[in-house]
Image: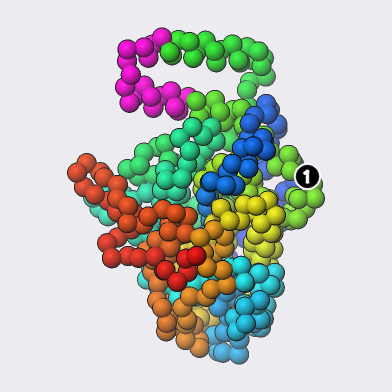
Amino acid sequence: MNQSQHFCGTSAHDISRRVFLSQSLAVGSGALLGTSGAVHALDEDSLNAALKKTGRNVILLWLAGGASQLETWDPKPGRPTGGPFASIPTSVPGVHFSELMPKMAKRMHRMTVIRSLNTGDGGHGTGAEMMLRGRKNEAAIQYPDLGAIVAKELGRADSKVPGYVSFYSQTEGRGSGKLSPAFLGARYAPMNLDDGSMPPNLSRLEAISDLSHQDRARLRDLLSARFASGRETETMRSHSAAYARVHGLMSSEPLFDIEKEPKWIRDRYGPSLFGQQALMARRMIEAGVSFVRVSRAWWDSHGQNFETHAEMVPELDHVMATLMDDLDQRGLLDSTLVVAFGEFGRTPGVNASLGRDHFANAWSAAMFGCGLQAGAVYGKTDDDGNTVTEDEAGAGELFATILAAIGINPNKEYHVGARPIPLVNPGIEPIRSLLA
C-alpha cells in the first residue's frame, strides 16, 4: 500500500511516519541536546519554590493530524466501528479506555476527559486554527492563539525566559493553524523550536571572552541609560525590555540543555523525541515559561489506522503518565494544566485502506492538573461513536474551560482600537462541572 493511501494528499506527509519514528527513537546527544553555557538564576531553589506557590502554566500536547478517540479515550469494543483493540477499566468505576493506554487508565482518577467535542471542522488548517484559538479568524480580525493569551495573562513582566515556547520537530501539519499573537503583538509570539531544542544563535561567540561580553553589556547599559534620559517613551521601554529578554535568554542557555537532567529522569521519559521534549516542557514551566506546546505528528491515519495507533498510542500513554508523575513529585501538578488534543478526531467508520478519516463531530480531549475536577468524564457518544448524545461541547467551550482552569476570566476583553475583543465569542461559557 503506497503512502498516498495512508495519509492526506498534502506535502506535509512527504517524510514517512516510519522514518520519523526511527529517527526520534535514536535521539540522544544530537539536535535535541545543546551545549551548556553560563548558569543563571533559573536553577535557584527559591525561584522554583516561588513558582510552585504562585505561577500557573500550561503544557499543550498537540496531537497533530488528529488522533483517534476510539483508540484512546472513547473505545467502542465489539461494535462494527470499534476496531481490533479491547477496552480496559480505569481507576474510575465505569470508565474505560483503550487497552493501548494502561498507564493513563490507572491514573484516570487524576484526569478529566471530554468525550463530546463537536467542532464541525475537519480541515487540517482550519480545524487547527479553531482549536488553537477557540474560534475561527475573521476577515477583519485575527485572534491570538491560546499560548499567546496565556503568556500575556500569566507571564511575569520581569521574566528573562520566554513566555511561550513551541516544539514542532516533524513536518506533518507544521503549517496548519499557524501560531500567532495577532493584535497582542510580537512580545507574546512563541519561540518556535522546529529544528532542535536549542534556540539558534543563543551561545556567545567563542571569539568573545566572558569578560568582554560582560564589559560590552555594561557599556550598552550605560549608553542606553544616557540616551533614554529625557526620552521616556513606550518605544524606549519596549526596546529596553526586548534587549533584557535577549540578554536573559543568553544567560539561561542551560535551560535548553536536557543533559542537565539526571540520566534516570531522562530514562523515565523514554528515548523518543516526544518524550524528551515533554521533559523539556517540564523544565521550562519549572523555570517560569507560561505556555509550552509539544507537538507529536503523524496521527493522520487514512491508511493502516490500527497499526499507526498501536505504535503511537503507547508512546502517548507513557509520556503523559510520566509527565503527570514528574509534575506531581515536584509539587508542580497543582499549578500546571496539561491538555492533549489535535485539530479533530477520526471517523468511526473504517475506509478501504483500513484507515480512519477526519472527523470533527464526536471526538475527545484529555486534561489533568490545576483547576480541574479530577476523575471527571464529560459527555457521551452513541454506541458506535457517530454522534454526541449528551453534553455536546465545541472548540469555544474547551478553550473557555482551559482559561478558567488556570484562573483567566474567559469573559475578559481586549481592545483593538475602540473595538472590544472578548477572549471567547459571546455566549460561550466554560464547562463548569469540570472546574475544581
Horizontal placement of 401 versus 319: left or right?
left
When the figure is inspected, residue 173 is found, relative to residue 310, above or below; the finding is above
Residue at the right extreme?
A: 264
**Residue displayed at 45% across by 48% down:** 150
In which quadrant of the rendered view does residue 334 lie? bottom right
When the figure is inspected, residue 84 is found, relative to residue 273, above or below; the finding is below
Q: Is residue 34 visible?
A: yes
**Residue 390 point in image, percent of width and height:** 42, 82
**Residue displayed at 46% across by 63% down:** 343
The front one of 373 and 358 is 373
The front one of 27 and 435 is 435
**Residue 11 point in image, percent of width and height:** 49, 56
- What's the amino acid at mark 1? Pro
When the figure is inspected, residue 214 is found, relative to residue 57, above or below; the finding is above
Horizontal placement of 293 versus 18: left or right?
left
**Residue displayed at 39% across by 27% down:** 238
Residue segment shown in magenta: 226-243
When the figure is inspected, residue 249 is found, relative to residue 145, above or below; the finding is above
Check disc 1 and report the residue beneath it: 262
